[in-house]
Image (cartoon, grey):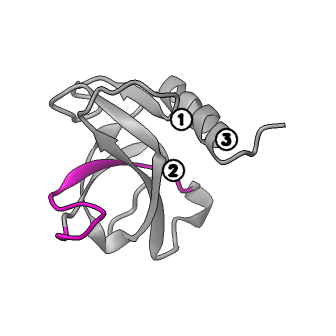
Amino acid sequence: MVEPKRGELWTLAGGGGALTTKPRPVLVITSDVFSDFDFVTVLLVTTDQTAAFTRIPIQASKQTGLIQPSMIQVDKIVTVHRRNLRQRCGYVTPTVLAKVREAATAYLGFVG
């Protein structure tokens, strides 16, 4: 059984649906407190470099496991069954995770 942790990047299986037609990286944002749950909440990652407050840049590196510079899409929040997570790619830095939290808080309207 896969055990994803907050801040890790995983490959999400493609399913031919509207969510993803091919395997793609995702960032796990579910709290580790809920690691026993069958479902995990993730943010989709894209190589499209379109700038927006809902997109957090992330570099390709051994740490992230990404092969191209990418963007974490804070406005693409999905919850999937953990069996759809295929492989751990890497992880983001605490600084990147803090930027994700700030953007998600604003996007969801939980500010102030």
The verdict on residue 49 being magenta is no
Classify residue 110 by image quadrant: top right
Give the label on residue 29, or none: 2
The residue mark sitting in front, 2 or 1, is: 1
Mark 1 packing: few (<14 Cα in 10 Å), some, or many (20+)? many
The residue segment tinted magenta is 15-30
Give the label on residue 105, or none: 3
Residue type at mark 2?
A: Ile
Residue type at mark 3?
A: Thr
Looking at the image, residue 45 sits to the left or right of residue 94; the answer is left
Above or below residue 16? Residue 88 is: above
Residue identified by numbered label 1? 100
Classify residue 9 by image quadrant: top left
Main SS, magenta region, reads loop
Give the Cα separation between the discs numbered 1 and 3. Answer: 8 Å
Q: Dividing the image into 4 quarters, which one contains the C terminus?
A: top right
Residue type at mark 1?
A: Val
Give the Cα separation between the discs numbered 2 and 1. Answer: 9 Å
Above or below residue 25? Residue 64 is: above
Give the Cα separation between the discs numbered 2 and 3. Answer: 12 Å
